[in-house]
Amino acid sequence: MLEKIDLTKSLDKETYKTELKQLETELKRAQQSIREHNIPVILLFEGWSSAGKGTLIGKVVYPLDPRYFNVLSMNKLSEDSIMRPPLWTYWINTPSEGRITLFDKSWHRAGITMSEADRNKYFYDVNAFEEQLISGGTLIIKIFLHISAKEQKKRLKDTEANNATKWRVDDKDWEQNKNYDKYLVSLEQMINETNTAKSKWVIVEAEDKRYATVKTYKTIINKIQEEIKRRGTDNKATYEKTSIKPNEISILRSIDLSKKIENKDYKEKLAYYQNKISDLGYKMYAKRKSVVIVYEGWDAGGKGGNIKRLTEQIDPRGYEVIPIQAPTKEELAHHYLWRFWKFMPKDGHMAIFDRSWYGRVMVERIEGFCTEEDWMRSYKEINDMELHMANHGTIIFKFWMHINKDEQLLRFRQRQDDPLKQYKITDEDWRNREKWDAYEEAVDEMLFRTNTSSAPWTIIESVDKKYARIRTLAIVVKELEKRLK
Amino acid sequence: MLEKIDLTKSLDKETYKTELKQLETELKRAQQSIREHNIPVILLFEGWSSAGKGTLIGKVVYPLDPRYFNVLSMNKLSEDSIMRPPLWTYWINTPSEGRITLFDKSWHRAGITMSEADRNKYFYDVNAFEEQLISGGTLIIKIFLHISAKEQKKRLKDTEANNATKWRVDDKDWEQNKNYDKYLVSLEQMINETNTAKSKWVIVEAEDKRYATVKTYKTIINKIQEEIKRRGTDNKATYEKTSIKPNEISILRSIDLSKKIENKDYKEKLAYYQNKISDLGYKMYAKRKSVVIVYEGWDAGGKGGNIKRLTEQIDPRGYEVIPIQAPTKEELAHHYLWRFWKFMPKDGHMAIFDRSWYGRVMVERIEGFCTEEDWMRSYKEINDMELHMANHGTIIFKFWMHINKDEQLLRFRQRQDDPLKQYKITDEDWRNREKWDAYEEAVDEMLFRTNTSSAPWTIIESVDKKYARIRTLAIVVKELEKRLK
């Protein structure tokens, strides 16, 4: 593919000057329309060493209002990035509505050096990531700058010959040039495997810098104009409606909630498992494994007390509990998964979510905070996100704290009668309770659609709180023992 | 001081067990009252190697609700931290209202290894930082764990003797033990110089772990209770009212706004300075110097266009423009300076603020978004913050884009008539305009009180926008040339 590209295309100085002037005005206008339409835009630049990414980025931002773009160089990733799933860095840096983020090098290149099996998984994750962003309203423009081996060699020599720039060339650049043909295969593979219907690469012939600049400008302007046009017309649902009504085979209703534990047994087991999980915490750290635990469940289902018993004996430098509340304005201006990515743990650490991204298919679905299309699509998005974490080696637990309607009523009343616990019960809890049946249907569907092998759900019978605590502890301890062997 | 402390204090097992049980309940309640009163709490643990910081932190968090605290280990700072002023890491990690952040090691210790001159400056910054947080409503509890050289030696040996823990001891620990007396002097100095009336250290005798635990618990509980009591009574202003009425010597009114530049001259100078600033951008990066530029000014004063010309030729990977808007809910739950610290540039980078922390003494003052005490106090807080950055080596510019009332009216009308610029003008702009005199007084006072040698203000005559652009560019270029020599 790359080999067949005609690299002799060029532009004379006069044509260039005239065209560029016009294009700068158009790009400026395009940025304004992005802001008017609240579109987040990702502009990424990939390509050979010395293909001119830096210079081109400089040219592209020239007409832009600098208050509404960011340029991020991905040349050297920080420790914070390296110790997390590879897409984490990109997730947390996705632009909010109306802003443009330009990436100098992109998430694709990490795949090049992987084994075939890992690469296949990784490019699946990459495509899922882009699809998620696009479905959420982000415009992604992917530009690949292409030059020949001969041109690359010339540029590297020229850069080295100049005292002011020679520091820019390192061994890796020369190594790429010497093995140009090998790299060509890898880069073609990267482009092919991440060239999806919704997110295509644009190859820019970059031997003539004037030609490359004009083609890049035109590409960006066209993609933005197309996107704005598309928004005016295309509003069809793109999710798959399936015929399964999960409620007909209700998972929740089949749960035996009478399970109990005796107090003496509870105390012994609590001490036993808390001791185990404390040791496993250090082992996790030593082995640089990260853990994500999601707590969902009915209001008054016992999440808080359960989390407390789980963490009580773990070194507090090794875990963080993240209570999830309603999204802020800034969070609403991003993809709905963005606010959770911020909290994803570093290798060796544990993040415990008290409520989570599953709000999308429960409260947001039921209260109509997003469209049906949005929440239907999100089952796959969530599965893909969890898969990406699992591929990185993160161990994921998801607990549904289950009680029945009578037990909830009892607990609500107890809270109201106890001055120390009154703050825990609000009007919203009572309102949610009235929607029990709608929640039951949503939860059944959620459990059904997001119960994956890399991130399975466990329903915790929580009418007896002590039983529930031992159950979650035992599950976490057993799985960690297995995975940290 | 430390030498004279009686380290033989201890507690028998029975007393400990009984006391601790009671204290755990009290600490749990104290956490609840922190949440009720929306108090952010910082709990920091300093002390000798092997004094037991980690274990003690574990004990302290045991009764706490894990959803509302964080533990941060400051053992190894990330590159992001190292490349910024030393207090940056702590600023961005300050807790929001109702939350507790526990620091394992603190901001004080960086001073120990500095030269005397640097240390004096640094401890000034540290004290200013703590005073800022305390004035803003944060409770800071500083605990120092003290053990003798003999006890330290014993613990290091014991830890090394155990296969499971020996990795925790390194050369630095032994070095500290061998030079215990030298360290003692440094640590005493650190404690003395940061022991202020509003923020005192508590020395905890840590040879007997039971005694240390109980004393730490009691300290924390008492400090929280005192703070809550204090809030009920103490509401007196603590800022200094000075007798100078800055408006009598109005700075703004003395500015000659007739300054102009010819178009030909403008074009030449623009090209000249933009070329210079582009080179200086690379030099900044090579020399790892950071730059902060603050733009303030009248509405329609020409900030946007000025920023555009300043940045146009700089490598976009080296700077970021930060447009400041109304604070979010999360930002309001922190100290008002927190939201700006997030954007402070890494060494080698430039951050340009389109409006800034000076909103505190302009819009917040005039609209009553904070109390008079708050904004009066903030002149010193802002000066101290800028001083801390300057001490780190950051080069700071502050520009006031100045026009008069007639010119503003002209520009407002032009914006209204131009369909492409209408979005720039809002009802709020017209409302602000009505408060011109109040703003003039506030700005005069701001310029007067925050014009420091390390972060001076420049008033930019902006009726002629081109003149203003060349003026800011020239100032930045000249100063950078001087500082980057």
Image (cartoon, coloured by chain):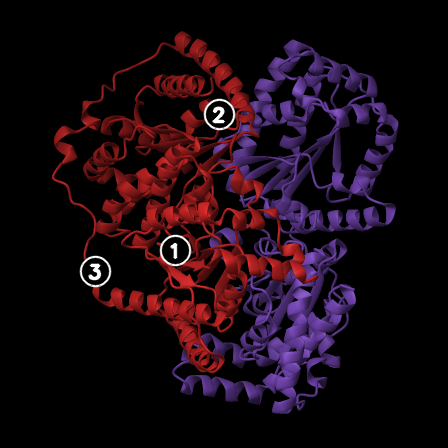
Chain colours: A purple, B red
Q: Which residue is mark 1?
A: B3
> Which residue does the image show at 59% across and 70% down from the upper left?
A311
Q: Give how far across and how far down residue A455 sits, in percent.
A: 73, 65
Query: Which one is in front, B483 or B74?
Result: B74
Which secondary structure lies at badge 3? Answer: loop
Instruction: Indicate which disc residue B311 carries.
Output: 2
> Which residue does the image show at 34% across and 49% down from the upper left?
B192
Return the chain for callout 2: B
Which secondary structure lies at badge 2? Answer: helix
- Asked whether residue B415 is in view, the answer is yes
Q: Give how far across and how far down residue B465 sits, in percent.
A: 36, 21
Among the two numbered marks 1 and 3 on one chain, the one whose residue lies closer to the N terminus: 1
Return the chain for callout 3: B
The quarter of the picture where residue B268 lies is top left
Which amino acid type is shown beneath numbered disc 2?
Thr
Is disc 2 in the same subunit as disc 3? yes
Which amino acid type is shown beneath numbered disc 1?
Glu
Q: Which residue is mark 3?
A: B235
